[in-house]
Image (cartoon, rainbow, N blue to C red):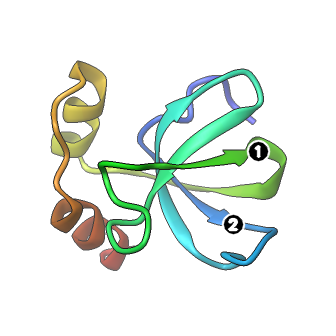
Amino acid sequence: MGTDMVGMFAISKAGHDKGTIYLIVKEEAEYVYLLDGRLKKAEKPKKKNKKHIQIIKKEADDILKEKLFYGRHIYNEEIRKAIAQL
């Protein structure tokens, strides 16, 4: 997997959330932090091991990517809309 996954979408491959689509908002050594705007909201991202997700090639739109890059607040509604557009 690439070193910069922030702003990409991923599907959970393991766990009770298997099959859920998320937006990657933060990346650490072996973990990523994920949001879906519904259960995992901007206030409390889900921490998940990188080997338990499958990257979807599509990246978030420019507005969301810019907000992530500059550390601006992302609204749950924006995340839900971006996921729905996949």
Please tell me whether residue 34 is drawn above or below residue 41 in the rendered image: above
Residue 85, quarter of picture: bottom left
Residue type at mark 1 is Asn
Q: Position of residue 1 (x, y in %)?
A: 75, 36
Q: Position of residue 50 (x, y in %)?
A: 75, 43
In the rendered image, which residue does mark 2 sit on? 12
Spatial CA span between label 2 and label 1: 10 Å
Give me the disc on residue 5.
none
Q: Position of residue 19 (x, y in %)?
A: 66, 79
In the rendered image, which residue does mark 1 sit on? 49
Callout 2: few (<14), some (14-19), or many (20+) C-alpha neighbours within 10 Å?
many
Residue type at mark 2 is Ser
Q: Position of residue 67 (x, y in %)?
A: 20, 33
Point 23% across, 72% down: residue = 81
8 left or right of 10? left
Which is more toward the observer, 26 or 9? 26
Q: In which quadrant of the rendered image does the C terminus lie?
A: bottom left
Q: Check whether the beta carbons of the residues at disc 2 and disc 1 lie within 8 A of each other.
A: no
Secondary element under disc 2, as helix, strand or loop, is strand
Point 68% across, 48% down: residue = 48
Callout 1: few (<14), some (14-19), or many (20+) C-alpha neighbours within 10 Å?
some
Please tell me whether residue 9 is drawn above or below residue 62 in the rendered image: below
Please tell me whether residue 28 is drawn above or below residue 84 in the rendered image: above
